[in-house]
Image: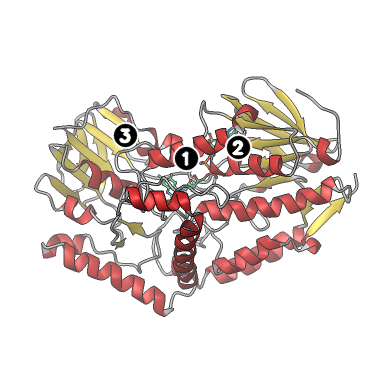
């Protein structure tokens, strides 16, 4: 569909992505009376991360009552840390309940956004065309699977898949299963399947610090009470939020007492729960806790100590049809190989092509590394706003809260266009340069920069994240600093 340029409530919006952030943006537009929008989703269902990741053991590692929209609290969560499928159901039901689903064009991947004569021209892989005044890109952070660069990977003769592309037709029971990777995903998979498989081989390049956690269920009485009185949920959220704020203060101050407490909790978890001293040392990281994204698990150490489980710390040399060869000359024969090797975290809106004012090409702009003012706006790309864009607060936080704050901020930018103050808004080059200068300077003092290899680090080894306390993010999202923006009338 093509519409002509419009102002006020006639503004046309395109939201790209129907994951947690895209659903949220749609609800907020609708709430503001801005109903002329389409949500483009390349898959056939909403949910993003929670649609794509279906591996055994998938669990949110943020408390359930924090991992939901503030305006759609959920008294029905089964656990303190809910399973992935429950989160998927939650987002599907919210999208239905808030009337987002009819706006979604499923199976329609946006391949190009070009700013031309004051509007964004969108093209999809299916050949559809749209023209929008504002684009909200909610295309995800942990979205494009990263495959390991191992010689012979493709030659593996049995079942092999990435953890985000789990093949549920492949049987696990009684089979020899190998897992490459030791991040949160691998840890959850190991704990979930160790009992079922005949042998479980975990290929570890880097050991992880693990924060111990229990995952209690909510009783029927608790759920009834939540249904009755949402204030009880608000109290749980406030308590959890307080803890997460303390955590966010700690990670950005690597010498803080809270950081030391977290490190101590991880150390005693390892020392008290891994009995064989040799295994314990192989599981002990040589970097500080929190430097990599903290893994939360109450059952990984038990699982890896099972007689049918083996931790391999020898480097992988190559893969052949029968299995994995390690540097000590061993061949680990396997029936199933799981690649829990994470995501391309610097892709953001790419591979979609985004061409801004005067033919500026985002791919070229970001050739070195992606940057955006407050992770939302790129100079020269007017009215193109990202949710969960580059260098934002990712880590052990609820990305739902992050997205709510960002969408609230974007709505304030939109208000300036809606009110007729301007037609085009984008951050100024100097605002982005100053933001990046301060961000990099501060990032170097955080725990993420204390000497480890992690997906937080950019090509320079600088943490590509929000390096200040979370409270500062809340304050900055509350109202835009207008001097950071160029507002054009036409
Ligand atoms: C295994 C795993 C566990 C996680 N656990 C947590 C956790 O415990 N707590 C937490 O806060 N976060 C967690 N996250 C992060 C999680 O990604 C976010 O919390 C959240 O789901 C991000 O939502 P999103 O909408 O920004 O992105 P996504 O969920 O990635 O959704 C993006 C959507 O955009 C669509 N899309 C992308 N490009 C296009 C295009 N060009 N055209 C059309 N559609 C497009 C995709 O198909 C997808 O549906 C986890 C991530 C993973 C992978």
What residue appears at the point 86 percent right and 33 percent down from the top-left corner? 5
Q: What label sits on residue 98 in the rendered view?
A: 2
What separation in Å lies between label 2 and label 3 (alpha carbons)?
44 Å
The answer to the question of whether label 1 and label 3 lie on touching residues, with beta carbons closer than 8 A, is: no
| Helix, strand or loop status at disc 3 | helix
Read off the residue under disc 1. 90
Picture coordinates of residue 140, whole percent (x, y): 54, 43
Picture coordinates of residue 362, whole percent (x, y): 68, 43
Q: Quadrant of the N terminus?
A: top right
Q: Quadrant of residue 13?
A: top right
What residue appears at the point 54 percent right and 43 percent down from the top-left corner? 20
| Helix, strand or loop status at disc 1 | helix
Label 3 C-beta lies within 8 Å of the nearest ligand 1 atom: no
Q: What label sits on residue 153 in the rendered view?
A: 3
Residue 96 seen in the figure:
yes
Along the line of sight, the residue nearer the viewer: 466 or 74: 74
Badge 2 or badge 3: first in the primary sequence: 2
Residue sticking out furthest to the top: 127
Picture coordinates of residue 327, whole percent (x, y): 21, 48
């Amino acid at each position: 569909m093509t519409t002509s340029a419009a102002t006020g409530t006639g503004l046309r919006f395109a939201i790209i992505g129907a994951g947690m952030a895209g659903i949220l943006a749609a609800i907020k537009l609708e709430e503001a009376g801005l109903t002329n929008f389409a949500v483009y989703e390349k898959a056939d269902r909403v949910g993003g991360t929670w649609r794509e990741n279906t591996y055994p053991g998938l669990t949110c590692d943020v408390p359930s009552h924090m991992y939901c929209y503030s305006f759609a609290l959920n008294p029905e969560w089964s656990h303190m840390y809910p399973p992935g499928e429950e989160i998927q159901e939650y987002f599907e039901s919210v999208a239905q309940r808030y009337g987002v689903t009819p706006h979604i064009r499923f199976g329609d991947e946006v391949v190009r956004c070009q700013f031309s004569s004051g509007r964004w021209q969108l093209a999809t892989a299916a050949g559809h065309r749209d023209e929008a005044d504002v684009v909200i890109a909610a295309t995800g952070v942990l979205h494009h699977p990263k495959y390991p660069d191992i010689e012979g990977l493709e030659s593996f003769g049995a079942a092999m898949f990435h953890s985000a592309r789990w093949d549920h037709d492949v049987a696990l029971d009684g089979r020899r299963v190998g897992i490459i990777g030791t991040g949160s995903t691998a840890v959850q998979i190991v704990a979930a399947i160790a009992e079922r498989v005949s042998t479980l081989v975990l290929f570890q390049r880097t050991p992880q610090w693990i924060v111990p956690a229990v995952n209690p269920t909510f009783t029927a009485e608790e759920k009834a009470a939540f249904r009755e009185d949402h204030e009880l949920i608000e109290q749980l959220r406030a308590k959890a939020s307080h803890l997460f704020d303390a955590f966010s203060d700690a990670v950005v101050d690597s010498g803080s007492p809270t950081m030391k407490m977290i490190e101590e909790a991880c150390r005693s978890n390892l020392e008290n729960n891994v009995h064989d001293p040799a295994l314990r040392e192989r599981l002990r990281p040589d970097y500080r806790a929190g430097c990599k994204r903290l893994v939360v698990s109450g059952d990984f150490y038990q699982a890896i100590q099972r007689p049918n489980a083996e931790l391999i710390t020898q480097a992988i040399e190559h893969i052949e049809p029968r299995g994995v060869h390690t540097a000590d000359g061993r061949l680990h024969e396997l029936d199933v190989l799981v690649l829990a090797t994470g995501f391309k975290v610097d892709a953001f809106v790419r591979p979609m092509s985004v061409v801004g004012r005067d033919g500026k090409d985002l791919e070229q702009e970001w050739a070195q590394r992606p940057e955006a003012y407050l992770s939302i706006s790129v100079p020269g790309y007017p009215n193109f706003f990202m949710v969960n864009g580059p260098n934002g607060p990712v880590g052990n936080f609820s990305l739902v809260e992050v997205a709510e704050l960002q969408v609230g901020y974007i709505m304030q930018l939109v208000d300036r266009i809606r009110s007729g103050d301007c037609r085009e808004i984008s951050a100024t080059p100097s605002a982005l340069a100053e933001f990046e200068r301060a961000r990099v300077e501060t990032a170097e003092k955080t725990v993420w920069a204390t000497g480890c290899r992690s997906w937080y680090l950019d090509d320079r080894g600088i943490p590509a994240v929000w390096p200040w306390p979370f409270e500062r993010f809340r304050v900055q999202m509350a109202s835009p600093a207008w001097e950071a923006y160029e507002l054009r009338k036409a």
